[in-house]
Amino acid sequence: MNSFESIFWAMGASWQSSVLWPFFILIITGFLFGFLIWKKIKHPIVKWTLFVLIGLFPAGLYFAFYPIYESDITNDYRTIKLNKTSDKGSLEVYVLPNCPYCIQSIETLVKLKDRNPNLLLKFKILSSKNNGGHIESALREHKIKYSFVSNNLNVKTITKGSYPTFVLHAKNSPLAWVWNNNTFGSKALDFIESKLK
């Protein structure tokens, strides 16, 4: 989440809205500037060409640095049934000790936890030698609970070899929703918040 998106998020917008609102604002701003130039040009082809180019340029430039991913538009999770149930919902994140994508996910999950203090958040670091690598120090810095797990059959069934893997456990049910790194985006975060209410 960049600083532009954070403004909307801090005002209480959903995760997906926080991603999309900057584009709407930049498109409107671009076309307003395009209209100011459009009024000053007399040649119709040049007028319309500049109007469209100037109108789309700010949003296009922003998109080049902060693209919208498929996971910001769709909520592509899979459901699994686990052997255990809990009276509270929780979010578990399966990570590897030095996985850069796993480390990057911490910032987003810290914001999710800040906005949802009752969320039970726990990282599970796959390490047979209890070596947490870089992710362990980042989790300690943010005071996030974590434990070490071995890559057993149960973990393989949940992660399918993709890291980080995010698992939302339903309250009082063996049902869990699972996202891998490529499917975990703003839509998933909105879905998680809806399940916490």
Image: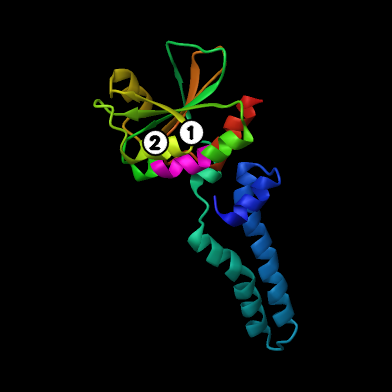
To which residue does mark 2 refer?
164
In the image, is 146 to the left or to the right of 19?
A: left
In the image, is 49 to the left or to the right of 122?
A: right
Crowdedness near tag 2: few (<14), some (14–19) or many (≥20) residues, C-alpha within 10 Å:
many
Label 2, secondary structure: give it: loop
Closer-to-camera residue (42/126): 126
Instruction: Tell me residue 34's x, y (percent).
Output: 68, 76
In the image, is 76 to the left or to the right of 27?
A: left
Q: Please indicate, yes or no, whether residue 192 appears anywhere in the rendered image.
A: yes
Q: Quadrant of the C terminus?
A: top right
Instruction: Tell me residue 15's x, y (percent).
Output: 61, 43
Magenta residue check for 30:
no
**Residue type at the position of mark 2:** Pro
The stretch of residues the image draws in magenta is 103-109
Across the whole image, how many numbered discs are drawn on residues?
A: 2
Measuring 70% from the left and 75% from the top, which residue is drawn there? 33
Magenta residue check for 107:
yes
To which residue does mark 1 refer?
143
Crowdedness near tag 1: few (<14), some (14–19) or many (≥20) residues, C-alpha within 10 Å:
few
Q: Identify the main secondary structure in magenta.
A: helix
Closer-to-camera residue (73/156): 156
